[in-house]
Image (cartoon, rainbow, N blue to C red):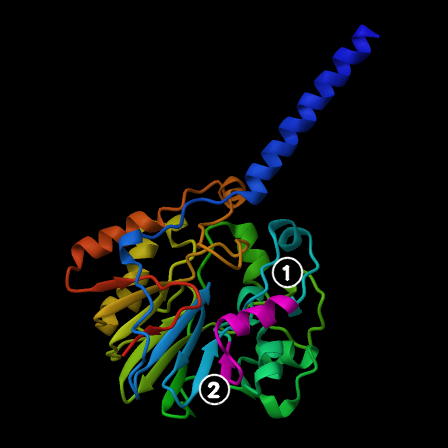
Amino acid sequence: MKTVRILALIFLALATAIAGAAYWVLATYEPAPVNPAWAVESGAAEVRPGAVTVRFTGTSTLLFSDGETQWMTDGWFSRPGPLEVIAGPIAPDIEAIARGLERNRIESLAAVFPVHSHYDHAMDAPEVARRTGALLLGSPSTANIGRGWGLSEEQIRVVEDRVPIPIGQFTITPIESRHFQFPDPDVVELALRDPDIIEPLVPPVGTFEYKVGKAYTLLVEHPAGSWLIQGSAGFIEGNLEGLDVDVVFLGVGSLGTQTPDYAEAYWRETVTSTHPERVVLIHWDSLTGPAEGPFTGRVRGAAVLSGRTDRTREFLEAQAASSPHLEFWTLPRFDEVVLF
């Protein structure tokens, strides 16, 4: 009996240790990879007529408004957890979408534009379009996500490279770009190879069935100002040559896991070449973190699985130190901030 008790205690201790390790890997998060000093608060209680405002949900979901027209990138509100993402299948979370629209105070939208077709950008967009009357803009792959959700063809528009799209007083010009190039070849194979969704995608499906499609840089022009939205930390050399904008919304997800040469080239091609006065950091929060409350960095399991330290904050702080003329922002969740 004594031996049985000892074995039972050993088994219990091992099970507790394994459960604790699993919790640490899958349910705890690294600190956010940005400097808290860059955080901006919501604007004045009363927004002046003609002002352009932005609201940030997380990742690269951004809502823009000039008081007359509202449109958004991505419209992603579902936050499947680490096990769901790894094991699948996943599907839009209808209740999370409803909450996200409510928190952003959205009743109607002119357009929703996923910057590419991975799940954390395009999965919810068709339901957002359905609920708000928005036009779903994007690549043929994004169009097939819309069709798989049952969105009508009248609400789907496949965009063309560098062909401007007027949305109220906003003009959105999609520029075909490149997704962040993952340093892990296995992730590249899953997330970037065979990039197109060639038929309507009907969820629930595996995470990587949401293929990348085409990745876009969005040039946005408005009488109040101009800006770029770079939702993923990828680039094509010389792709943005000749552009001059006021603000860059810069996706920095996993940038610090790449080589220093890659990170420097990304900064040079996306920020230095376009001469902004302000950089607004996006896509730095965890994809599986809470949908409410403070933003977090990546789930700790990402570091364990990739075996790579994320030095994003160090890189960004070095750029800030070497560019004192450049203003760095991170946005609050859901609150309206005056952009221009």
Q: Residue at x 19, y 64 (%)?
A: 326
Identify the residue under disc 2.
160
Element marked by disc 2: loop
Report the magenta residues as a range: 95-113
Q: Residue at x 40, y 79 (%)?
A: 64
Q: Quadrant of the N terminus?
A: top right
Specify whether residue 105 is painted magenta: yes
* Dot label at residue 207: 1
> Which is closer to the viewer, label 2 or label 1?
1
Element marked by disc 1: helix
Three-letter code, disc 1? Thr
In this orientation, does residue 131 appear?
yes
Q: Position of residue 292 (x, y in %)?
A: 51, 59
- Which one is nearer the viewer's eye here, 321 or 199? 321
Q: Residue at x 67, y 61 (%)?
A: 90
Q: Residue at x 23, y 67 (%)?
A: 272
Q: Residue furthest front?
A: 45
Q: Position of residue 204 (x, y in %)?
A: 72, 65
